[in-house]
Amino acid sequence: MAFSKPTPKRTLHSTPGELYRDLTRRPGSTLSLWAHQSELLKIYVNHVNHSDIALELPTGTGKTLIGLLIAEWNRRRDNKRILYACPTQQLAQQVHAAAQQEGIDSVLLVGSHRDWAAKSKRKYESADSICITTYSSIFNSSPKLVDCSVIILDDAHAGEQYVGEAYSVTLSRMEKRSSYDTLLEVFQPALDDIFVERLKFSDPDPNIRGEVRLVLPLRQPGMVGELHTALSQLPEPHSFRFAMIHEELKSCLAYISYSEIVVRPYIPPTYNNQLFSKARQRVYISATLGEGGELERSFGRTHILRVEQPDANTDPRTGRRFFVFPEFVDDADADDLTRAIISEAGKALVLSQRTDVAMADAKKFTPNGWSILGIDDVSTSMEPFTTADNTICVLAARYDGLDLPGDICRLIVFDGTPDQLSLQERFLRRNAQAGVALESRIRTRIVQGTGRCTRGPKDTAIVLIRGDLSAFLQRPETISAFTPELQAEIRFGAENSQDGSSDDMLENVRAFLTQDTDDTWRSDAEPTLVEYRHQAIQDPPEGSEQLSNCATEEVEAWIYASTSSWENAAKHAHEVCRILGDGGGATRQYQAFWKYLEAAWVDMLAEEGNDPSLKATALQRLAEAEKTAGGGSWIHQMAPFPEQDSPKSSRVDDIAASKIASLLRDNIKENSTIGKLERMVADLNQTSAPTFEAALSILGCMLGAISSKPTPHGRCDSTWCWDNELWIALEAKSEHNEAGTISLKDIRQSNGQLTLLRSDRKLDWIPHCSATVIISPRSGVHSDGIVIADKHLFLTKPATVREIADDTLRAWKRLLSQKDGRNETDVQELIIKTFRSFDILPYDILRRLTMNPVGPASPIETDGNMKQ
């Protein structure tokens, strides 16, 4: 007969580690707790009454078991309901299976609440079992889970992606065109007419697809009401998302792009979610928590206590990764080399932040006869991939939540820097140049993504890097923020890629893959990796301390803004700006973003109280934001506040506009000028150095600069000088192929170009915001060149220059069609308005060309030289 015994509602164990000994585990469960797990569980008990606590455990060190033990211990100790939340259903299923194996009572409640098993729901509600669920079951407009005592949030580093999405209304142009158009009409008064016109084209210019603009409905008369009406008419599932933010709509931001429109608060107002906010404790678990206040912003919580990791010496060793950079190999076809490496590995996981990029990679690199799996094939289980051979699995924005240990998969192809998973991220990164607020998030995605196949200490995997991630992983400030182990692996991989041939790389790959039977890797590679690890020092990037210190103030500011408490919101925003001010240039652009928000909230307070003095304060704060952001900033594209004058142009803008107006006054022929511009665009698509360089100088001229190829020996290929306000020296390497890195010789030659230009112009100073830009199709710079690179030296792709040329052609077409009948002042205004809309005023050009510093990041700080 079956055994029958009462199940005690409460048991007394002093720690979760003590509970572990009494669990009835199944075959295949963990044999025993590691020392670091036991230590961390003891530390947790010391903070058991803290409302928000974060625990960090490196990948492969048993964080799921830690979370389950904490959950089960709390359930048994207090006889209370406990939730264990995962980002995806697939992860929740994995955790549920792990709980069953470890002898922990759990039920799985995922998907629609209508499909939940009544017995499972009852066991959770009576606290007989912990509940394994997903973030979406908690963060929605009407959670069907009853309240709980403790919430365990696994993979908490992914919080912004999943929680932020829950508080966002996203209208896709392709999927919901009518709703997209309706919202665009609402926001149109706050957007310049050229931008709107480009959005409405059925056959748009390619460059518009990458642009995004910010709108603050709060400071546009009547816009919040119109937005509420438009959003309230949306069908499911958009209506559910609107229900999450309708009470906070006044504080929401809107991001407008060609592909989609997103309306969301900057920080999710989770305080309104009773299931989440009323829990006695929230425990955030991750392999990488970050150091810049990322958790607080992602979950809308203040004062999350980060538990210090136990002695790192007690951690088990992580798996070994071999980084390879095919694009760094001289005279190699990176695509052919990538395909060859995939063939050696037998299967591959391809990760990118965009589906189209990942799928294009798979089609390009897949050996003949192999199959390709997409998200639809593995949405519920990775089994179709894990059990197959000669297969490539393609996933977008899935940098976490995949376990592919052992020999299941030993190759990850990682294409592109994971820095723009949402319009908000794209705006902060590209428009606001406030990427410092995202750096911790980006590094976390890199750590998570590169660790998908090295889940345990004995796992080994190749990580193949492509695209702009190659350059990102070369930046000293990026590398130094990683753990010494990861620093060593990246350094070793980069050096062996840039100093070897295709045959060398394939030989190294084979040695790595066969290290169980061949000692080559252990004898030749491991000693170097150990040496590099001992040399490495982990150092948080500049500004990290300030970002961490102001996170609580940011959350407080948004809580007050979401309740229309503008005075308190502005006070906390002001404190955010004060703290960020201590970060210097590293946090300057993020500070400008918050200064703008402070100005908007003060302006709203002034309107509600009809207070002229507060109105003056708001305009003063706005002027401070403009000055902090510098010339060519996103603020100049924002619609004015009520009673605010249109943004004034800067001196360098006026210089450019004056030069262009002079060209227009020369009675130029429209057709011949457009023909000249079209030839310029065509020539910039050529690799021939003389052709490309001549076109560069024409482009500079059409941008309002004094532009030419300097004739003295050793000079760069073109200089763009807007008098002595701004200089850009251009080193064109158009004849480079994509293989290899920028050489040490090229860096030395480029370093001195601004000094030579100063000499040629007979000045004793260089405009402080000037830059030298190397134009090359190559993704990276030789490590020796990075060491000596001047702080004003940048690398850009020919494609970026071509985009600028395309925008210049379109801007000039508009000028030529609209210039007639205008006086000189009106023509100047038309030029500035048109060039600002196409993002090609001088400081816009500077920003677009200097996104990738060669050496340690040194943001170019422009004051904008605004006229008073």
Image: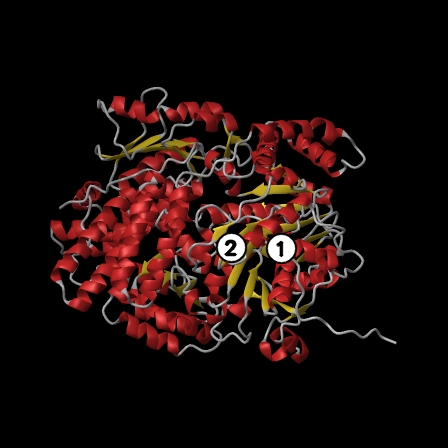
Which residue lies at the image location 42% right of the left edge and 69% below the top edge? 272
Disc 1 crowd rating (10 Å Cα; few below 14, some 14-19, many 20+) is many
Q: Picture coordinates of residue 437 (x, y %)?
A: 41, 48
The answer to which image quadrant residue 510 occupies is top right
Disc 2 crowd rating (10 Å Cα; few below 14, some 14-19, many 20+) is many
Which residue lies at the image location 38% right of the left edge and 47% below the top edge? 549
Q: Earlier in the sequence, mark 1 or mark 2?
A: 2
| Between marks 1 and 2 in the image, the one whose residue lies nearer the viewer | 2
* Residue 831 visible, this orientation: no
Residue 714 or residue 422, whichever sits in front: 422
Report the disc number at residue 394: 1
Q: Picture coordinates of residue 511 (x, y %)?
A: 73, 34
Position above or below: 216 against 669? below
Q: Cβ–Cβ below 8 Å for labels 1 and 2?
A: no
Q: Picture coordinates of residue 24 (x, y %)?
A: 77, 61
Q: Picture coordinates of residue 29 (x, y %)?
A: 76, 56
The residue at the far right in this view is 1
- Look at mark 2 in the image and give the residue it sits on: 53
